[in-house]
Image (spheres, rainbow, N blue to C red):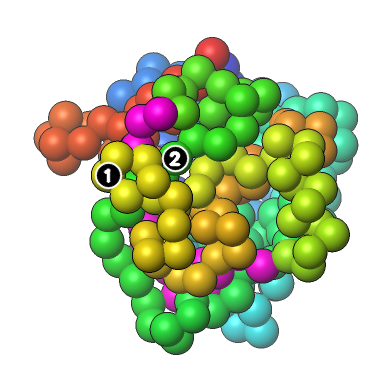
């Protein structure tokens, strides 16, 4: 699969993503700049984590207006796959490609640690090959990761099988006790109604290398790429 990784001013996970997709998952990777106006016929566009434009205004609020986003939105509207990780997830919500918003963590602190995720959606490409009885250990690193949507949107997400991942414990139990940031319904990631745009706060690209003693993230990418 030809994958395009976008770099915005302030992106800091772009090289991690390029290494994971290119070196460890053997995909063709193209680097896309925020001022580019096309996606170079990529099959998958990835918006990586970081602090685009210094997270001024709101995280992702300025990056949403970068020239590349017009092409990303067109790509998504034409059925192309788009993945946003952390700040990329925030950008996708700001651009309207995904429902909801990412708010400040409920403890008003930046969180950087490993968490466990339970795959929820059985019909989304990024989760359908995952064992939904298994808890996947994936790192988080964010200050604005609390997923929020109103009750009607949350109901729609549940009914349409759009909740990708929920925070859980090491044996897959979903509970507020294991929610690191106060996200509604313990949500760690969602997809759009067409299930071709995916957003998640945890960083699977940081869990693909045996040198890090964790390859749970590789399984997430393999589900999407397959």
**Residue 173 pos. (x, y %):** 39, 46
**Please, what is the dominant secondary structure of the magenta stretch?**
strand
Give the vertical position of 203 relative to 125 (above or below): below
Q: Is residue 134 magenta?
A: yes
> Which part of the image, by quadrant, shows the N terminus?
top right
Q: Is residue 134 left or right of residue 8?
A: left
Q: How many marks?
A: 2
Residue at the far top: name it: 226
**Mark 1 crowd level (few <14, some 14–19, many ≥20, 10 Å Cα):** some
Closer to the camera in the image, 25 or 96: 96
**Residue 101 pos. (x, y %):** 69, 66
Q: Which mark is residue 170?
A: 1
Among the 4 quarters of the image, the one containing residue 216: top left
Give the vertical position of 44 relative to 225 (above or below): below
**Residue 114 pos. (x, y %):** 27, 54
Q: Which residue is mark 2?
A: 118
**Residue 210 pos. (x, y %):** 16, 30
Q: Is residue 143 left or right of residue 148?
A: left
Q: Earlier in the sequence, mark 2 or mark 1?
A: 2
* Residue 199 in sight in this render: yes
Among the 4 quarters of the image, the one containing residue 191: top right
Q: Find the magenta span and give its range.
A: 133-148
Circle 1: element type? loop
Give the vertical position of 98 relative to 22 (above or below): below
Task: Identify the residue shown where x is 72% and y is 25%.
Answer: 41
Separation of marks 2 and 1 at Cα, in angstroms: 9 Å
């Amino acid at each position: 699969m030809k994958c395009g990784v976008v770099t915005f001013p302030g992106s800091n996970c772009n090289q991690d993503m390029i290494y994971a997709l290119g070196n460890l998952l053997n995909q063709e990777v193209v680097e896309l700049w925020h001022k580019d106006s096309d996606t170079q016929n990529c099959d998958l566009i990835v918006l990586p984590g970081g602090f685009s434009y210094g997270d001024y205004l709101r995280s992702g609020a300025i990056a949403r207006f970068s020239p590349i986003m017009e092409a990303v939105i067109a790509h998504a509207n034409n059925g192309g796959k788009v993945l946003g990780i952390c700040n990329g997830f925030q950008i996708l919500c700001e651009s309207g490609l995904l429902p909801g918003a990412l708010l400040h963590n409920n403890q008003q602190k930046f969180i950087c640690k490993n968490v466990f995720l339970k795959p929820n959606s059985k019909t989304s490409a990024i989760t359908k090959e995952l064992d939904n009885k298994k808890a996947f250990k994936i790192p988080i690193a964010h200050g604005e990761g609390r997923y929020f949507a109103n009750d009607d949107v949350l109901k729609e997400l549940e009914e349409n099988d759009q909740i990708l991942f929920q925070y859980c414990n090491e044996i897959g139990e979903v509970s507020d006790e294991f929610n690191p940031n106060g996200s509604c319904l313990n949500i760690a990631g969602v997809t759009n109604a067409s299930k071709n745009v995916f957003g998640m706060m945890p960083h699977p690209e940081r869990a693909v290398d045996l040198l890090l003693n964790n390859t749970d993230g590789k399984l997430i990418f393999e589900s999407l790429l397959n």
